[in-house]
Amino acid sequence: MKLIITEPRDFDAAAAREIVEQIAQKPDTVLGTATGNTTIGLHRELVRLHHGGGLDLAKVTLCQIDEYVGLPPGHAASCCTRINEQLLSHVNIAPENVVFPHDAARSPEDVCRRFEQSIRTRGGIDCQVVGIGENGHIGFNEPGTPFEATTHMALLSARAAGAIARWFAAQAEIPREGITMGIKTIMLSKKVLLLAKGADKADIIHRSLFGPVSTDVPASVLQLHPQMVVILDQPAAARI
Ligand code: GLP
């Protein structure tokens, strides 16, 4: 495990540096993305480097870790909208090189199967960016998810549903399910970049990196990954 602890103001640049190095080594990188709050600044930094620093993403494939089920295209809460607004609409990733676990015209089972197939066809994920929930979830893999799970439809936890509640007029409109890369899918990535910032993540980061490897804390499985890079700001690293 490579552990990088930064000042809060340097966090996004440190995360972007890992991705820039990855793309320099392999221009046709398959990059897995996550769209929580943690990665907003990373995406902003990648856009800045694309416009001002010569970062070329023409050969990169973007593969999104998760998406809510049942949202119409362009809905403000959807991961697709977020990554479009934060990254895709500002850089030169080709539309045919964007892989999303979403297709309203297909059954969820079919979406999951085709998503796994797309990853395999592209040679696997080279670098998967992963955020972490305060209970250790990664993607929509909540505590209890088997480590062998590949891409699947998962029930959203109350917390995950609550995180997008502000975009819905009524509780009943909030999606109940999401499609997520499974833990096995994430573990098969050649490299995993785990990002966490803020004091709220300090406890779970300590448990995930140094506690027992257990499905009770999904992110703890990352201890077993041979190429794991962890970037924390100082508040998230407070218990290390
Ligand atoms: C959920 C999302 C992930 C995100 C994680 C952390 O799991 N499905 O995509 O990485 O939460 O979210 P945040 O970065 O907002 O703390």
Image (spheres, rainbow, N blue to C red):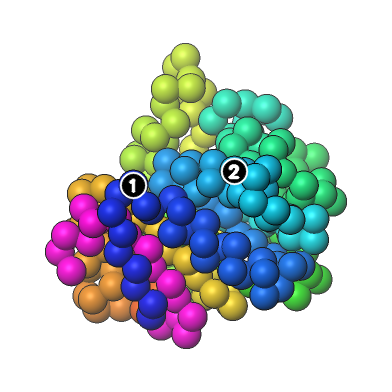
Q: Position of residue 133 (x, y in %)?
A: 35, 52
In this view, 44 is above or below 66: above
Residue closer to the observer: 112 or 37: 37
Please tell me whether mark 1 sits on a helix, a strand or a loop: helix
Magenta region includes residue 46: no
Residue extending furthest toward the top: 169
Question: Which disc, if any, is residue 48?
Answer: 2
Figure disc tally: 2
Q: Residue at x 34, y 40 (%)?
A: 159
- Kind of residue at disc 1: Arg
Residue at x-position 64% and y-position 62% = 31
Question: Where 219 sits versus 102, above or below?
Answer: below
Q: Which residues are magenta?
A: 224-240
- In percent of width and height, residue 213 lies at 30, 78
Q: CA distance from mark 1 to mark 2?
A: 16 Å
In-image side of 117 versus 55 (left or right)? right
- Between 90 and 136, the residue placed more toward the observer is 90
Reply yes or no: does residue 227 show up in magenta: yes
